[in-house]
Image: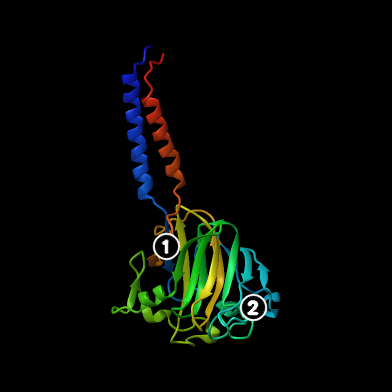
Amino acid sequence: MLVTIEMQMAANRIFVAFCLAALVVSGANASSLIAYLSAPGQTSSIIAGVQTETFNDPSLLSGVLTYDSPIGVYTALGPNYLSQTVTRIPVVAADQYGGADGSDYMYVGIRESGDASSVDVVFSQQVDYFGFWWSAGDPENTITIYDHGKLVAQFTTSEIIDLLDNLSGEVIALNGDTYSSSSYYGNPNPAYLGKDSSETFGYVSLVASGFTFDEVVFGNIGPSGFENDNNSIHVGPLNIPADYGSFVKISNLAFTDPVPEPATGGLAGAIIGLGLIAGRKKIFR
């Protein structure tokens, strides 16, 4: 059968239209990084299949600069914001300010000389999810997200304070359930129930879609502390809200730079290639 250049170009136009439609669908599923708050009183991740660091290794209480955790490597960064030489990742026993279920916990800030006011965590693998129990919360705590050394986004806990401090006095979960904002204030653990009632306690989840990341840095932009526990990671996409409707959406985090969309590159290349083929002035048999 003799195939003319007109027939070839018509076929190419059909395929190009298909590719463009696929690009539109890909754009609709663009990358996102969303912060969620669990229901009041939850101190650990409800995501199935997570790996978790609990800070209950006794060596952490004695003071270490680096720690090889089940989820990755923790490193104290220095100097701290008082320009002191950093000597340890601050981990302490449970008290009114933190320690999920009475366990040890990490804080990022300065209670003693040498405490780190920022701690880096390089995960053992690419992850789609990072969660942490945020205790004795204040608006000066930050989580900065990286992928292969590139800054992706930053989350500041002031967004949670703003979410809870609204005129209605309640927040609404993805499934429509409502929670009283006041139920996030005060330590929920039995040994310290209701203590530190002026500060917030809640489990925070950062969920990536369309990309993965491999590092976070806990930071504190003032003289307060960033108390946290039960750091969890998950590998693989998550079905939210279908599987986790009890989450309360905090915000879509803004990317510092556009996150690459791997799926679109191949389609764009195919379109370019087809354009080159269509431009050839020859007849094919």
Q: Is residue 253 above or below residue 118?
A: above
The one nearer the camera, 45 or 134, is: 134
Residue at image location 69% in from the left, 75% down from the top: 64
The one nearer the camera, 132 or 107, is: 107
Could you tell me residue 17's position as x and y percent?
A: 32, 34
Identify the residue position indicated by label 2 in the image: 86
The one nearer the camera, 97 or 225, is: 225
Could you tell me residue 255's position as x and y percent?
A: 42, 60
Which residue reaches farthest top?
A: 1
**Marks 2/1: CA distance?**
32 Å
Could you tell me residue 56's position as x and y percent?
A: 65, 74
Kindly state the secondary structure of the residue where label 2 is placed: loop
- Do callouts 2 and 1 mark residues in contact (Cβ within 8 Å)? no
Label 1 crowd bin: few (<14), some (14–19), many (20+), radius 10 Å: some
- Per the rendering, the mark at residue 104 is none
Query: Which of the image's four quarters has the N terminus?
Result: top left
Q: Is residue 200 above or below residue 33?
A: below
Identify the residue position indicated by label 1 in the image: 34
What is the tally of numbered marks visible in this picture?
2
Residue 200 appears in the figure = yes
Kindly state the secondary structure of the residue where label 1 is placed: strand
Label 2 crowd bin: few (<14), some (14–19), many (20+), radius 10 Å: many
Three-letter amino acid code at the position of disc 1: Ile
Q: Quadrant of residue 168?
A: bottom left
Residue at image location 64% in from the left, 78% down from the top: 86
**Which color scheme is applied?**
rainbow
Q: Quadrant of residue 267?
A: top left
Three-letter amino acid code at the position of disc 2: Val
Residue 180 appears in the figure = no
| Residue 238 falls left or right of residue 123 | left
